[in-house]
Amino acid sequence: MRETRLAGVILAGGRSRRMGGGFKALAPLGGKPLLRHVIERLQPQVQSLVLSVEKHVAEFDAFGLPQVEDPAPGSRGPLGGLLSALGNMEADCHWMLLVPCDAPFLPLELAQRLLNCALDKDQWGCTVRYDAQVQPTFSLWNRRLLPRLEKAVLEEGMAGFKQFLRVSPLAVLDWEQADFSPFFNINEPDTLAEAARLFGPVSAPI
């Protein structure tokens, strides 16, 4: 039997310097925090959900999700966040879907399509490729990757996904073009304003 139970993790540990500091996940969009949009789109796709943070954030407690801290003091980047989340995954889940906290239009079928791709290609993970660009923050990881991740983060000092994927490539899922990218992410005030503009006409799930 193929292992198909999924956990989810939202990367929420960034310092948001380009947004002027503070917590980007709390930025308002369409009348609610950006993180709330991501939770609502991701939660139906997984059996459990956690937030990846550098250290506990009291302001995130209101979202009712467990917070998983980075594996060592100081930021180890998103790869360290994935390592901690995967290592703390519930025993009955073998796959973890990872997304960033700043992607309010992420696809509702993301988990299933990534899982199907990984299983069809007999790989321990899968990343999205959109418009010829790999999007590693939208990806699926199997717990069997833990030893590789531990070595990369704790012994070799890796911090980013692209660096890891150069030495441990995963399956790649090519996502079809849309009117605007469902992987649109918000890094600065201008992109937050653009998201607000896009959010207006979005009346149906992507």
Image: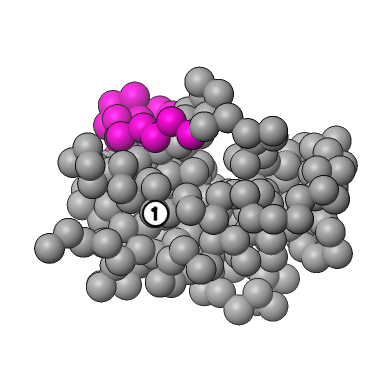
Relative vertical location of residue 21 with respect to residue 54 in this rendering, above or below: above
Q: Position of residue 188 (x, y in %)?
A: 79, 38
Instruction: Looking at the picture, tell me which residue is in the foreground, 202 or 99.
Output: 202
> Furthest residue to the top?
132
Q: How would you rate the neighbour count of disc 1 (Cα within 10 Å): few for under 14, some for 14-19, many for 20 or more? A: some
Q: Is residue 41 left or right of residue 83?
A: right
Q: Secondary structure at mark 1?
A: helix
Relative vertical location of residue 3 with respect to residue 193 in this rendering, above or below: below
Q: Is residue 170 left or right of residue 102?
A: left
Whether the magenta-drawn stretch holds residue 131 is answered as: no
Q: Is residue 193 visible?
A: yes
Instruction: Looking at the picture, tell me which residue is in the foreground, 78 or 173.
Output: 173
Q: Which quadrant would residue 93 be assigned to in this image?
A: bottom left
Relative vertical location of residue 129 with respect to residue 59 in this rendering, above or below: above
Q: Who's the residue at 41% across and 60% down the image?
A: 85
Q: Is residue 76 left or right of residue 103?
A: left
Number of residue marks: 1
Q: Who's the residue at 52% across and 74% down the image?
A: 66
Q: Which residues are magenta?
A: 155-175
Disc 1 target residue: 112
Q: Is residue 151 left or right of residue 60?
A: left
Q: Who's the residue at 86% across and 64% down the image?
A: 31
Q: Position of residue 152 (x, y in %)?
A: 31, 38
Instruction: Looking at the picture, tell me which residue is in the foreground, 55 or 5.
Output: 5
- Residue type at mark 1? Gln
Q: Position of residue 154 (x, y in %)?
A: 33, 45
Q: Who's the residue at 73% across and 39% down the image?
A: 187
Q: Quadrant of the N terminus?
A: bottom left
Whether the magenta-drawn stretch holds residue 162 is answered as: yes
Q: Is residue 20 visible?
A: no
Instruction: Looking at the picture, tell me which residue is in the foreground, 18 or 173.
Output: 173
